[in-house]
Amino acid sequence: MFKKTLFAALLATSFGSAHAYQAEIGGALGIVDPDEGDTATAFAIDGKYYFKPVQVKNNPLNEAAFLDRASNVNAEISYIDYEFGDITSYGVGIEYFVPNTDFYASATIARSTDKEDGFEDFDNTTYTAELGYLPIPGLLVAVGLTGYNNDVDDDVDPTIRAKYVTQVGRYDMNFEGGASFGDTDVYNLATDLYLDKTLSVGVAYSGSRVDGNDEDIFTIRAKKFFTQQVSLEGAIDFADDYNTYGLRAAYRF
């Protein structure tokens, strides 16, 4: 399970004047330290292109695209090296805020190949699709489907999630929650506090239930923009049998 968590972790001075950007590229490093066995390492490259320039305005830099309702296409490639083999993954996605409305849609598809010593390659395709609505500024509620398909099994489950960016007192905050329901129930909660427009600290929790077995993961995370373009973020996941450490640097232009 820790391999999936690492992959998921890879698939966080105020500025008052308006700025804009239209693309972002990032690189990430992840390390899993299990209670037993050798560590696993992962590398990832991701990119995102917005259909029109994102207006930052006076929003937190990390939430500028969401608050500006910026439609985009995105992609990621990752490589995981673990004790008994390696996993190569790639995926693409789209987020679309319907112009002049409060409606939203998104979709993703990804493919991974697990090459484990002594076994045949295991290919797995995952996908998601969502429809959402923004009833008030800064709040998105979405429902959809998530699924996977491989040589052994396939499954499709319903999902629901919400994201809300608002001001609490003199601070900006981000609240997120979601769940999927099926043979495997998955649920998550997260919040981020913006100490200023460039710096956030946050906590998250995710849980899953498979065949009566529960797994809980607690996360602490932080993200800092050193300039309008350059950011660095890090996260630590604490799970029952392992810890995961992640670091990502990104550039906007």
Image (cartoon, rainbow, N blue to C red):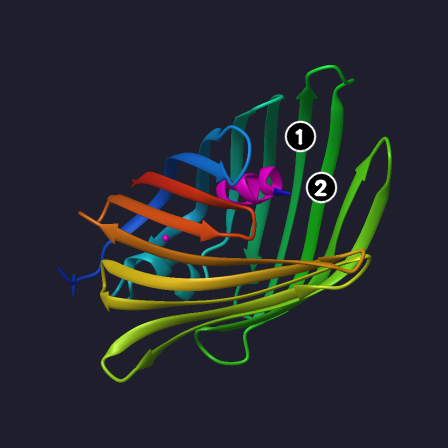
Q: Quadrant of the N terminus?
A: top right
Q: Residue furthest left?
A: 13
User: Measured from the top left, where is residue 191 in percent x and y?
Assistant: 42, 68
Tell which circle, 2 or 1, labels the residue nearer the N-terminal end. 1
Query: Residue flagged by tag 1: what amino acid is it?
Result: Ser
Residue identifier under label 2: 126
Q: Please tell me which residue is depicted at 59% across the width and 31% down the height of the picture.
A: 90
Q: Is 8 a magenta residue?
A: yes
Q: Residue furthest top?
A: 118
Q: Determine the image quadrant of residue 246.
A: top left
Residue identifier under label 1: 112
Front residue of 227/194: it is 194
Q: Please tell me which residue is depicted at 75% across the width and 20% down the height of the picture.
A: 121
Segment colored magenta: 2-12
Image side of residue 115 versus residue 45, left or right:
right
The answer to whether residue 186 is visible is: yes
| Looking at the image, residue 142 lies above or below residue 183 | below
| Looking at the image, residue 153 lies above or below residue 130 | above
Q: Residue furthest front?
A: 36
